[in-house]
Each structure stands twice: as C-alpha cells, then as structure tokens.
Amino acid sequence: MRVAFVVQRCGLEVNGGAETHCLKIAQHMSNYWDTEILTTCALDYITWKNYYSPGLAEVSGVKVQRFRVAQPRNITEFNYLSEKICHYFNKVSIKEQEAWMRSQGPISPDLIAYVKQKQHEYDAFIFFTYLYATTYFILPSVAEKAYLAPLAHNEWPIYMSMWDKFFEKPRGFIFNTIEERDFLKTRFPKINFEGPVAGVAIDPPSTLNAKKFRQKHNINEPFLLYIGRIDPSKGCQELFDYFIQLRKQESVSRKLVLLGKATMPIPRHPDIVALGFVDEQTKWDALEACDLLVMPSPYESLSMVLLEAWIMGKPVIVNGKCDVLVGQCLRAQAGVWYTNTDEFQVAIEKLDKQIRYQLGLQGKRFVERNYMWSKIEKDYLELLN
C-alpha cells in the first residue's frame, strides 16, 4: 500500500509533539507500507514562515514532500478572530469560523492541489491533528480514503460548530488515549468514534550520560525537568509562578531545567535554567540526570515526554486539570498531580528518594507493557485493513 501522512510541519528541527509522533509512526509503518509525509516548508508554528526548501527530502529514513506556505500568519488578525469566536460560539457563522481556520493556517495551495491531483496514486491518507488548515481543508477532498489521528483535547476551538460536519468525514480514527476518545464521544455524540487507542512507543538511545549533562551545564543540585515548547498555553507561566513560590519556602537547593524553544519571556531567576532547543541525546541525558519530570500543560491528547520519563524510571508531576495526564498517571501508578501552588509544593516535598524510585519503576513497567511498537504497528495495520 502507498500511504501518505499529512501534517502541518515535519523536520528534525521541529519542536512539536504531533509532528514528532507523525514522523515516528510513518517511520515504523514503512516496514509494511510505502510511506510518505506530505507537509509544508514551515518550521515555526507561530508564523508558518517558509524555512525548508520545497520538494522531496528524507527525514529519519522517511520520504517527506514539502510545499510552500502561501503567506505567514497575521498574528494580529488571528488573535482578533480568536477572541471574537471563543466568546461567541453560537453567534459565529461557518464562514467566519473558516476565516479563522485560514488565519490559523498553514495554507499551502500547492499542497492542496497536489493531494487533489495525486489522490488516486495513494491508497490512504492519515492526517495528524484535527486543529490545522492542512487537515481541515484537505481531508474532505479525500474523505473516502482518509483516516484521522485527532490529537484532540478539551480546548475552545473544538467547540466550533464547523467540526460537527467535519468529524463525520474520515473513514476511520486512531486515538492516543482512552480519555481523548471518550472526550470526542461526549463532544460529538452522533459520530461513531470506533478505532484503536494506539499512542506511540519510545526508543531511548543505547548510551546515556547524566554526569556529562550536569557538568556541561554546571548543574549540581537536584532538578525538575520540563521538556517542550515554553508557551503560556502549555501552562509554563503557572509553572514559573509555582516554582518561584516553592523556592521562597524551601531550604534545600533545587533547579528547574527547561528544554525547548521559548515563545514567552522566561523569568530571570537563579534556579531556572533555560537551555533552549536541544538535540535528542542531550534530552535523554537530561532525563537520566533529573529527579522528576514536570508537565504543566492543561491540554494534552497524549504526553510523549511522560512516556520518555517513565521508560527512564523517572516519576512525573502533572497538571491535575488535564484529564489525559491524570489518566496516564493513574494507569501507570507513576505520577502525582496538582491544581494549585500549595498542591504543587506538597507534591514535590512528599516525593522523597524512595517514593520517586518506586513510582519511576512502576512507570517503566507500564510503558514496557503498553507502548510496544509491535502492538502499535498492528493497530495501524488493522485500521487500514
């Protein structure tokens, strides 16, 4: 079978969970299918500015076809439309919602035209994430052979009425977590969301060096680790506030280490260490070195970094307002959660060395039992069959 994966961005430099997830699935399914990723030339999801060259390339052994974005996002217009829509769902027409989606982007007329012209050369199209224009404006044109990994969660855009008809179109769905699937069933009760809950498997490198990471970055204290985009929508402002408050009240030394590209100001604080976007080896060395991983995001469909922390035997602390993260912690018995600054402080104080070890061990066993490539590959094969 020839199968195309459609996603908004793709590249080793791309800092995004959905994009990394798509690349990993395409990479592993190339053992069974002739896989290809169709995407844009964008690197930055804020502006969608063209970064990569258009045309065919190879990323991690996967064929990737990139198409130019017509124009960068107009941030002012997008923010205006978002404010207008999120407060007046019942009064906004489909036309206005689709104007928001065009402003959301990325819009690539070349990609849209390619899929329409070449659709008969592919047996299936698998779209990653419902939220962007690459899915909304392309999937309906190939609906009879389209499958969707929604990566959906409880955020305001999913309540726009334009999704009511859209979610009727895919031939099938594949989900990240039970919580994601159940949320979609509640949001769209008339749609049959039958499909496997697959997620993604984790492949740590063969060698790890926690000592090297600590020495290189001059980190001698215990530290919490955050991995991902440093963005208010990911709960990072709340994390900073809670951590700074924690440091005012505790006597022991502790750092917060951040790995990822920042789209917001990072507080100047002696215990907050921002290392920016790092390579995969550095990320894994940091996981080996940290005491625990913190995931403050209120919106997730699956947290890959939780799985990465657990495979390393590290416990996690997560935002208790996110059902998906709490569900992952409950099933793994490998993490705790908070909903305010006091709970954040108590959770960290109570996680002594012995408890961290036990939670991390349970997390490692959970990932090894439930997130194996053999199972995930089988789920994708059965989805198309």
Image (tube, rainbow, N blue to C red):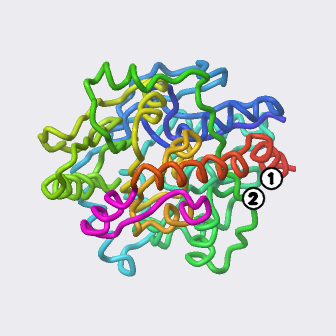
Q: Residue drawn at (48%, 30%), measured in percent from left and top?
A: 284
**Helix, strand or loop under label 2:** loop
The image quadrant of residue 118 is: top right
Label 1 or label 2, whichever comes before in sequence order: 2
Q: Which mark is residue 271?
A: none
Majority secondary structure in the magenta region: helix
| Residue found at x 70% / y 58% | 197
Residue 346 magenta-highlighted: yes
* Magenta segment includes 371: no
Residue lying furthest right: 385
Q: Position of residue 69 (x, y in %)?
A: 43, 34
Instruction: Identify the amino acid type marked 1.
Output: Leu
Against 60, residue 343 (above or below) is below
Pointer 1 residue: 383
Give the magenta-colored segment's residue range: 329-351
Amino acid marked by disc 2? Pro
Assess whether mark 2 and mark 1 are in contact (beta carbons under 8 angstroms): yes
52 left or right, relative to 273: right
Quadrant containing the N terminus in the rendered view: top right
| 33 on left or right of 183 | right
Q: Is residue 51 above or below residue 165?
A: above
Task: Give the left or right position of residue 185, taking residue 273 as reference.
Answer: right
